Image (cartoon, grey):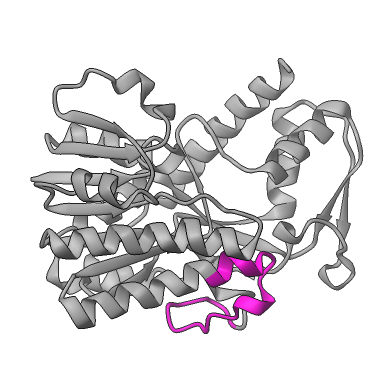
Amino acid sequence: MKFLVTGGAGFVGSYLVESLLDRGSEVRVLDRVIGELETLKGHPKLEIVTGDSQDREMVNSAMKGVDVVYHLAWSFPSRPADAFKIDVGGYINVLEAASASHVKHFLFLSSSVVYGEPACRPIDESHPHLTEKSRDPLHALTKATVHKLSSLYYTLYKLPYTIFIFWWGYGNKHIPGRTLRELIDSALKGEAIKAPEKASGSVAYLGDIAKAFEIATLNEKAYGQEFNLSSFQIKWRDLIELIVKLADSPSKVEIVPDERWDGHGFLTGLWEISTKKAEEILGYRSNPEKAREVFTQALKLDIAVRKKL
């Protein structure tokens, strides 16, 4: 079976590519850079196509002979015109090419930003897309738009799709995010750090995300469905205290009631993501204890990297 992974050289995409190769699959990657795939160059079952999903001819060419598409390419432009031209336009190009090539399954990794802000706990897939209330309304709107487009192509052209939604992902060696970097830097400087009292989020280990893609691929139960993914829940105050401990920092952590929190928007809200649907339909299971261990080890590595800067 042959896979096309758009954005396959990125943080999440490269993990999925490596997972597919480990299972013996043929993989073609379409990305603007080689990025995280540098160590996999020369693999006999990996083809890297340097290009952009905005280039319709390039996408059509990359789609030839492909059975399944994992779409992860996303650019996050700051202006609406650019966001719809680049991200939504690129998404349509991939959908069009997949439909024309009679691809068997189209899978997309989305973000909980589409939910806007938590209106209930836990957040399941029926949660409304409150895009205008999101901390990043443009990102939320474009993601919500491509959700609708996926459903439209399934209805009109019988292109089976599956969408996965997660809040914050991390790998074995790295936890991405500007907010985390800033917290680590503050701890290394010994600065006082404020933390919201109750705000929390559901983090997703890339190993669990890869497993979800694996069990959903060509699974008819997954067609036309959206699934939340998560590995475990963590409070920001607990994460900040863990950073201070691992960094051996003298920083004092001040706990602030959530209603008085005026810090970074990413540290706001109770993002408790329900994975019940994925568990019941796909048999998705995470191992929270293992996921926490991997998270802690990755955090140690990130702290070590920041220390050297």
The image quadrant of residue 83 is bottom right
Q: Is residue 306 depicted above or below 284 in this figure?
A: above
Residue 186, compared with residue 145, is above or below; it is above
Is residue 194 something one can see in this rendering? yes
Residue drawn at 26 percent across, 48 percent down = 57
Q: Can you tell which quarter of the image residue 184 is in? A: top right
> In x, y percent, where is residue 178?
69, 42
Residue drawn 53% across and 31% down?
297
| Residue 230 image offset from top left, x and y in percent | 45, 59
The residue at the point 84 percent across, 57 percent down is: 263
Find residue 301 and report its horizontal and vertical position in percent: 58, 25
In the rendered image, which quarter contains the N terminus? top left
Is residue 124 highlighted in magenta?
yes
User: Depth check: 141 or 288 in front?
Assistant: 141
**Residue 121 left/right relative to 37:** right
Residue 272 visible from this viewpoint: no
Residue 293 counted in the magenta span: no
Farthest residue toward the top?
308
Q: In which quadrant is the C terminus drawn?
A: top right
Q: How many marks?
A: 0
State which region is magenta: 120-141
- The main secondary structure of the magenta stretch is loop
Q: Position of residue 187 (x, y in %)?
A: 81, 33
Is residue 222 depicted above or below 304 in this figure? below
* The one of 140 and 181 positioned closer to us in this rendering: 140
Q: Residue at x 58, y 40 (%)?
A: 176
Q: Is residue 104 left or right of residue 303?
A: left
Looking at the picture, tell me which residue is in the foreground, 102 or 166: 102
